[in-house]
Image: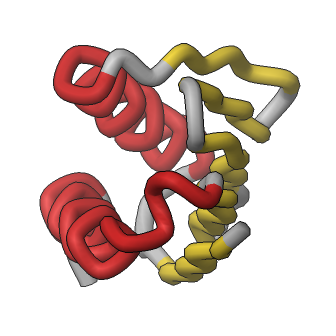
Amino acid sequence: MSDIIIRRTHGRSLAEARASAEHMAAELNEEFDLAYSWNGNVMRFKRPGVSGNLSVDDREVALDIRLGFLLFALKPTIEREVHRFFDENFPI
């Protein structure tokens, strides 16, 4: 298994950060058929070969992804795409 871990500070309120995370999750769901659900301020997601969680608070957004063996070779591509989503939804 291979992990992708991304942390990014943001200058938004908790409600704004959560709304941005929801928008990002909806885009990922549409593009990659990624199922997700919220438990408080932690979103858990899953699809075959990928699982993880995204948490938001009033200062930071944190993403932890676990890739299965078959997606290991795509890790650089997936990581690049995740950074693109973060750049769009949580600009520095």
Is 48 on the left-hand or right-hand side of 3? left
Q: Quadrant of residue 60?
A: bottom right
Q: Viewer-proximal residue, 9 or 30?
A: 30
Find the residue positioned furthest to the front: 70
Q: Quadrant of the N terminus?
A: bottom right
Q: Viewer-proximal residue, 78 or 71?
A: 71
Residue displayed at 85% across by 28% down: 40
Residue displayed at 36% across by 41% down: 20
List x then y, in percent, for residue 81: 21, 62
List x then y, in percent, for residue 29: 34, 20
Q: Viewer-proximal residue, 2 or 29?
A: 2
Q: Quadrant of the C terminus?
A: bottom left
Q: Would you place residue 21 above or below residue 26 in this image? A: below
Residue displayed at 53% across by 38% down: 18
Q: Viewer-proximal residue, 43 or 56?
A: 43
Residue displayed at 57% across by 27% down: 48
Q: Would you place residue 13 above or below residue 41 in this image? A: below
